[in-house]
Amino acid sequence: MAVESKQEKPSTPRGEPRRICVVTQAVGLDADGDALAPVELARLLASEADDVTLLWVVGPEAPSVEEVATCRRELDAASVDLRVLDRSDQLLPSLASPESRSAALLHYLEQSRHDLVYVPLEGGLAYFTLLAVETGAFAAPPIIVFACATEEWVHEADKAFMGSTEAITIAHMERYCAERADNLLCASAALRKWMLAKGWKVRKATVVPVLPLSPGIVGGAARPVLESEQARELTVFASARFHDGLSLLCDALDLLAPLAPADLTLAAFAPFGKIMGEHSGGLLLRRAGNWPFKLKFLPAMGLSEKLDHVARAGALAVIPSLAASTGSAVAACIAAGVPFVATNAGANAEAWHAGSRQPKLVEPDASRLAKAILAELEKPSRPLPVDRTSEWRQAWLDSRALSPTKTVRRRAAVAPPLVSIVMAHRNRPLCLRQAIAAVEAQTYSRPELVLVDDGSDQQEAIRLLDTLEPAFRQRGWKILRRPHQHLGAARNAGARAARGALILFVDDDNALFPEAVDHFVRAMATSGADICTAFQLIFYEDFVPQDRADGLVQYLPLGGPDALGLIHNVYGDANAMVRRSVFSRVGFFSEQPGYAMHDWEFFARASLAGLKIRPIPKPLYWYRSKPDSMFRTSNWYDNRRPVIDAFGSAPPDVSRQIHQLTVAQNTARSEVESARENLRYTPANRAYLDLCDLDPNSEVAVHKLAAIARSKGRGDTAASLSGGDLAGIGQTPWKPDDGWHALDHDALAKARLLTPRASELPLLLVAPGDGGIFLRPHVEGLVAASLDNLFPPFFRKLEAVVEVAHSDAPAIDFCVALARPDRIIDWRHDVDAQTIAFTGWTTVRDKFTFRTLAVMSRVRRKMPLSIVIAVRFTGSSNGFPTNAFFRKLRLSSD
């Protein structure tokens, strides 16, 4: 579903419709309201007769053909042209990374003609487009970036460290986009203030509320009039993110429960997610055990549909935010005139309007939120719709004419600077010929080539150098023949011998494109960078391909952030242009032998010293990848050590990100997902714990959530999850029996004989159905069996119901014990001292009479225990069948 290429068109004449591209990463209802803001924007612009393309940039999981067709039909009706961008012919097939998605957007815009482009800040999609503008590689149309919630803001609001390299990458890309955009539109003053507090250079950012934009949001008059004066449903406006306050709401409902009306219902919308490791639906259902009112789950809906539901149900919307970057839910409720209670968090305060007759915002505190909800239930407000959407829609329309915040400096015409191309070589004559031919084909007018031979000792290489000498002298180029001192020393020698103020390092197994030096010089001038790297096309042959279509861009360096520069080379390849002044500030390349990462270590030192590195997001040379290359034959440990040393004096902000990444990736899951871990400590929550490990919105997870609800006596909740059909909804695996849980046949079948003795008849049998376990006493001594690890963590009690089921059987002794799974019991010694708990021996003389043996662990334990059962003759065998049964084993956590 890659977008088709467009023919280049002249710019739109004045007075004609603008050709506007709106970029989005979401279209369907499975996204939250803020993520759908680009879709609403596209509709708005199209309603003003603009020629609007909505470009849907998708990741590795592309939408189905049917989903795209449905969205396209809906948008066609609004005169919006939907296009799907899921690949680029210049990249590997899947847009799996934020870098690849950003590069694909650049490639699309290079082949398209738009007068204006709107791009969401989230995901850093505009990164390479803006980088191409900064380095003079692309004359892009004005780029307007609009921000709802940045990656770093979301992590902070969710109280989570950025624990992946992708998260840190996105945060870096977003900041660059915010600072480099022609215009930055922030969804709230709170978000803009956060950016400024983080040191972002966004003082000229404009605050434009993102939602509501759609006319469907407004229309309180069109919504049904509430029949009841008092709300009997609380509708939750909160996603499954920690910062949306679902846990806070549960705490408030705990306080509200004794005072709430008996017929109250709590309604929450899908999709589900995880909060501190716990399934969000499971969280609500579990906490609902403390509430007398009903709980129902509603399917995913758009914002307008949610408001319609609130109005039709006569409900009270609850917005329990702990942090808010847009305030969109508050704004939507005010515009629609539906009653709500919300917290005074972040942008919610900006969205609230005194003229709406809505309750004042409350601090994000459980007690205050509970009081506010109760007050609205007892004496509801009569809100008035306050339509500010016209004002906000106009602000978005006005953004089309905003003057770019960036000014383009006109540079006086100057003579092109001398560029010294430094090329190190050793014993690769075939590659060298191709590399020199590429230098000779440069369109740039003032290059010089400094070829440094690092002690070639093969005759073919030496003969080639001899052959090249006359032509080099004629051009004023240089060949430096040196003893073998490795790559770093060779590059440094070339840099010292170079005459140009700009030095371009080129490996002898690569080949520059003819326009490469021109692009490098332009990038250095327009960006003011100290170092410029570039994209590359990779090939695997002995000879350079003739057609660039035969290569792919596989390495997408960003130029930062430095925190990730410790982990992988984010700066670019060694084929880079460097200002001569850089060497006086940070020194030359490392001359350590046997080391293949001279460029990475050099770039890291430069960036950490505050020098500016900018990759040119355009392939400018062929990069040869061969198994015998220096990189592929070197040791990664040796390569990384100098890089690590370079970060020994990293600035505090870089160290802080590295520390956060290290902590996040090495902290135990039990600490990061504390809500999930806490479920382990209460055996009654076992089903909720199992739910945590499923995809929250999978069919299996929803079915399990419905089954748990039904087992808790909440058939209405289960019905809301199953569409009203309870036929396929079973009970949970543990069947309550007065607080006890009986081990079923499958569990008993795992019994393992501990005391094998010679016997013509089996000593251990598991009876069919609910018959239990049969043990046969032996004349040589007791017979014992173990149910390994079947006494669950945090359980306390075990009861065994035993029976002698034969009229002629002698008296038999029974016992039950709880033991560590790794403990081998020596029955000749004190059993009580060897086990966690032991019943002692109980003699059963009566036949066909149930006796109960009980054992209890003194403390709860986090580890599972083994259940050990044993029988023996009280006296001696009388030769008749014994039929000693453990009919039932029941466990309790109380």
Image (cartoon, grey):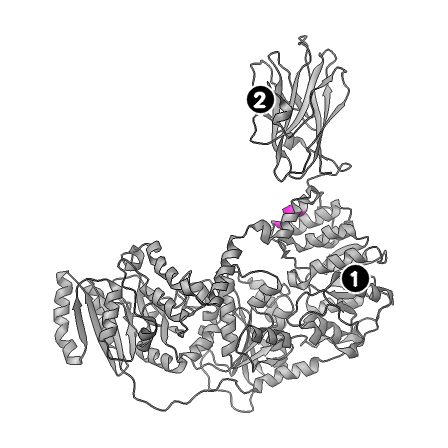
Q: Residue at x 39, y 60 (%)?
A: 644
Viewed as shown, does residue 212 lie left or right of 130? Answer: right
Q: What is the span of residues highlighted in magenta in the rendered image?
A: 688-692
Q: Residue at x 65, y 47 (%)?
A: 689
Q: Indicate the quadrant containing the C terminus: top left, top right, bottom left or bottom right.
A: top right
Q: Residue at x 43, y 79 (%)?
A: 134
According to the picture, the residue beneath numbered tag 1 turns out to be 370
Q: Which residue is mark 2?
A: 826
Q: Nearer the viewer, residue 412 or 322?
A: 322
Q: Is residue 225 above or below residue 885?
A: below
- Asked if residue 36 is positioned above or below residue 203 in the image, the reply reads above
Q: CA distance from mark 1 to mark 2?
A: 59 Å
Which quadrant of the structure image shows residue 357? bottom right
Quarter of the image for residue 510 reads bottom left
Q: Earlier in the sequence, mark 1 or mark 2?
A: 1
Residue 5 in view, yes or no: no
Quarter residue 529 falls in: bottom left
Q: Nearer the viewer, mark 1 or mark 2?
A: 2
In this orientation, which residue lies closer to the viewer: 681 or 220? 681
Q: Is residue 830 magenta?
A: no
| Image location of residue 550, percent across then percent down | 34, 66
**Mark 2 closeness class: few <14, some 14–19, many ≥20 residues within 10 Å:** few
Q: Amino acid at mark 1?
A: Ala
Depth order, front residue of 832/421:
832
